[in-house]
Image (spheres, rainbow, N blue to C red):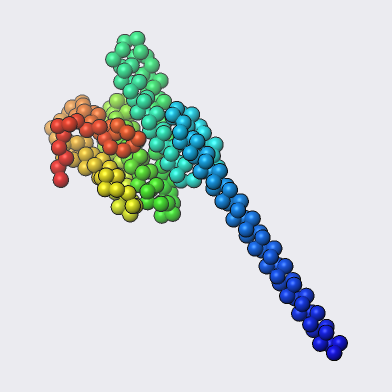
Amino acid sequence: MIKNTRISIALIIVVALTFTTLGVYCSREYRTLNEREVSERLLRQELHRVDAVTDDAAAVAAYRKISPTLPEIQLRIVQRQWRIALELLGYMQRARSNSELQNETVVYDGQLKRLLDEIVERCGATLADAASLRPDITWRLYNTAGAAKVLSALVMLESEQNADKVQGVMRDALADFKSAIEAVDKSGVSPLYKNIPRWNFEVLNGEENVRKFEVSMTDMEKNQALKENLETLIPDIGGYAPGEPMDTRVKK
């Protein structure tokens, strides 16, 4: 009788300890899950707040302070930086046409080069583990990297007059646009967005653009022809569709 009582007490203790342990585990899991949900909600709120910032430089600074540095945050940064790059390009073009501002072109040129290098580097670092990224983020990163390289090629041609080096950068841009096409096809975006990297690729890879030059052309002629072609390729909006003249036809 005493033995049976001891066994019963032992079983009760074991059951009690089991339920206590399970209760502690469930409590911890619930607390962890709750903390994660709160953290994600706060992150979304902060992203929403910064997304509404109209000043691109201020937005970039704010994005950099957000932790953790998720791929979608990196994408937001390079998209804002691209808009800043286009603004700098506009400053450079206006400065060249104004004798009083021509001395400032060197400053703008340096800023633009550094910014484009940072865009390409940030895109590359984020895409280092591209397989783990969502396709809707992957294609935008590749597309933005390609656009930044196109603009880098134009700036490089202006300053270095090296057509061979520029064509190497353009080949890298083509590879980025091709990767963007592969990624966008895996995403659930509309056909309009799926056509964006295709448009960039076709324009850049067209017969009348930067890949092919006549052997008889001098280096100066090559540089001028390449520059004129590149100027039609600079995207108008956020690393996406290029600003192509209305009379241009893309050969299918």
Residue 29 visible to the viewer: yes
In this rendering, the answer to whether 14 lies above or below 89 is below
Q: Judge left or right: residue 29 versus residue 212.
A: right
Q: Residue at x 69, y 63 (%)?
A: 24
Which quarter shows the C terminus? Answer: top left
Q: Residue at x 48, y 39 (%)?
A: 48
Percent coordinates x, y for residue 190 in the rendering: 29, 48
Which quarter shows the N terminus? Answer: bottom right
Residue 153 visible to the viewer: no
Q: Residue at x 28, y 37 (%)?
A: 241
Q: Quadrant of residue 217?
A: top left
Q: Judge left or right: residue 16 versus residue 73.
A: right
In this rendering, the answer to whether 100 lies above or below 8 is above
Q: Judge left or right: residue 239 versus residue 223.
A: right
Percent coordinates x, y for residue 226 in the rendering: 22, 31
Percent coordinates x, y for residue 103 in the rendering: 37, 14
- Comparing 202 with 58, the one in front is 58
- Comparing 186 with 175, the one in front is 186
Q: Residue furthest top?
A: 100
Q: Judge left or right: residue 27 versus residue 238.
A: right
Q: Quadrant of residue 159?
A: top left
Q: Residue at x 15, y 37 (%)?
A: 249
